[in-house]
Amino acid sequence: MPNVVVVGAQWGDEGKGKVVDLLTEHAQVVVRFQGGNNAGHTLVVGGQKTILTLIPSGILHAGKTCVIGNGVVLDPAVLVAEIDALREKARGSSPIGTTGRGIGPTYEDKVARRGIRVRDLLDEARLFRKVEERLPAARDELAALAARAGVTAPELDASAIAREYAAFGTRLRPHVRDASLYLHGEVKRGARILFEGAQGTLLDIDHGTYPFVTSSNTVAGNAAVGSGLGPTAIDKVVGISKAYTTRVGGGPFPTELTDALGERLRTVGEEFGSVTGRPRRTGWLDGVVLRYAARVNGLWGLALTKLDVLSGLPSLQLCTGYTLRGAATDDLPADPEDFQQVKPVYETLAGWEERLSGVRTFEQLPATARAYVRRVEEVAGVPVVCVSVGAERGETILVTNPFS
């Protein structure tokens, strides 16, 4: 049975959660393999919005197993709150969202071999010992931050911290096991596994627009490392891209629109962070970025989301290449300073007026919308296997099922 990785092909926020939710119908196991609760996946099912930050996006399907792999850095307080929120939702309560902090420092602790692992939460004495060992340096770091901010640093008490987090360990104990061993058994029995990444390719710590990146490897190759399986367990990689481009925070963005059109994309596309609420920068679709994502992830197919946001625009611009200091280039510059200086080369395509929310097959799309999708395929060098025309689960056209 094929096992499929879903990754972002841009700077994150591409709609991975929606695609994972859709593909979960064809999988038995869904695995989150990297990142933390600093990014959210938004699902809309039956008009009800759910924002997940740690639990895999397949959780809304009955009878599926969701696994948080070793590549994830986990705030147990946020995970417990997310579990409780999902239980409340199942009883008909209102949806809630959570916001976390400290993802980068947690990965720093992991690499420095001083991190506290989930298994440590299950033994309060061991947890206290590890917290006590870590606390002196943490106090110094906190004091320095407080001094810069002009505030008084809070007191840190090892016993209180250990008691609080040991309680989280008690709550989580029934869900804790060797994820690598479990997944290996699922592979042996022929289960279909869906691997879910967070953020996007251009935010990868090694392959992204460094230093404007996240603290983990977001590319598909990390699905094996972050879940404890060998690379031969992965059969196909699906990259998720919006029909335009967005990014949050600083860093190069060659196709950015800072005019009324960029604001229109932000408003119509509801381009605000699901966790932070920050407005996203918006721009035309960048084919160079997609070709780069195809290369570093080994993309088998592309899922194009938010095609409906482009409805009503008389014409569209698609970036097919760059110029750098007057010279044409088809590739992403390796030097971030060069990337900051590139100018996009655009191709103009016809737009469409029709609303797409009721479209359920590729053939039902307006002719110019189909032409746009086909041209994106050509520019990216990857077939479009899924097209999203709205926020709801059902507003998605699965052209080719990666689990087939």
Image (spheres, rainbow, N blue to C red):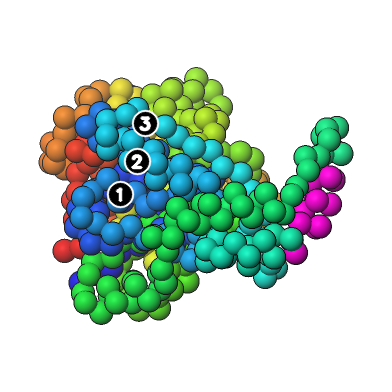
Would you name the residue on which mark 2 appears? 86
Disc 2: CA contacts within 10 A as few (<14), some (14-19) or many (>=20): many
Name the side, left or right, on which 301 lies relative to 318: left
Q: Which residue is mark 3?
A: 95
Q: Position of residue 365 (x, y in %)?
A: 18, 36
Please name the residue shown 51% across and 52% down the image.
168
Considering only order in the chain, which callout, 3 or 1, is on the residue closer to the N terminus?
A: 1
Q: Quick one: label 3 or label 2, which is nearer the N terminus? A: 2
Q: Is residue 139 magenta?
A: yes
Kind of residue indicated by mark 3: Pro
Horizontal and vertical percent position of residue 362: 16, 42
Name the residue carrying label 1.
59
Magenta-drawn stretch, dominant element (helix, strand or loop): helix
The magenta-colored residue range is 133-145
Circle 2: element type: helix
Viewer-nearest of discs 1 and 2: 2
Estimate the x, y position of residue 245 in percent, counting from the top left. Answer: 45, 40
Image quarter in which the N terminus is found: bottom left
Disc 1 to disc 2: CB gap under 8 Å: yes
- Three-letter amino acid code of the residue under disc 1: Ile
Residue displayed at 59% across by 62% down: 124
Distance of label 3 from label 2 (alpha carbons)? 8 Å
Label 1's element? loop
